């Protein structure tokens, strides 16, 4: 059974703000890969990042080490 998506969590609201503001972010994965781009959408399982070539990458939440605004 799928976990319910809790939009009241601070982390979820932070990501929604990045989506709304079209803010560039860096997404560091547990594999040490770094993905940079804009968050297109999120759900309870995944986050979609679109890079500067307009290529979407869907990342499973459990693979993420951290997400931060790009300086």
Image (tube, rainbow, N blue to C red):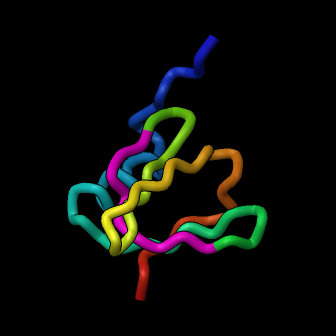
Please give the name of the residue rendered at 68% of the width and 64% of the height, measured from the top-left corner: 29
Q: Position of residue 66 (x, y in %)?
A: 62, 65
Q: Position of residue 42 (x, y in %)?
A: 42, 43
In the rendered image, residue 39 lying in the magenta stretch gets the answer yes
From which residue to which does the magenta span run? 34-42
Can you say whether 11 is above or below 27 in the image?
Answer: above
Please give the name of the residue rendered at 48% of the width and 48% of the height, measured from the top-left corner: 47
In the image, farthest residue toward the bottom: 71
Q: Nearer the viewer, residue 16 or 10?
A: 16
Quarter occupied by residue 18: bottom left
In the image, farthest residue toward the right: 31
Lateral position of residue 5 relative to residue 62, left or right: left
The count of marks equals: 0
Q: Quadrant of the C terminus?
A: bottom left
Q: Nearer the viewer, residue 52 or 22?
A: 52
Can you say whether 1 is above or below 44 in the image?
Answer: above
In the image, farthest residue toward the left: 21
The chief SS type of the magenta part is strand
Q: Position of residue 61 (x, y in %)?
A: 61, 46
In the rendered image, residue 2 lying in the magenta stretch gets the answer no
Please give the name of the residue rendered at 30% of the width and 70% of the height, measured from the top-left corner: 23
Q: Position of residue 40 (x, y in %)?
A: 33, 52
Q: Quadrant of the N terminus?
A: top right
Lateral position of residue 41 relative to residue 47, left or right: left
């Amino acid at each position: 059974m799928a976990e319910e998506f809790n939009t009241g969590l601070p982390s979820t609201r932070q990501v929604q703000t990045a989506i709304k503001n079209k803010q560039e972010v860096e997404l560091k994965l547990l594999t040490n890969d770094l993905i940079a781009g804009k968050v297109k959408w999120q759900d309870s399982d995944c986050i979609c990042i679109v890079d500067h070539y307009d290529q979407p990458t869907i990342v499973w939440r459990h693979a993420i080490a951290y997400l931060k605004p790009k300086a």
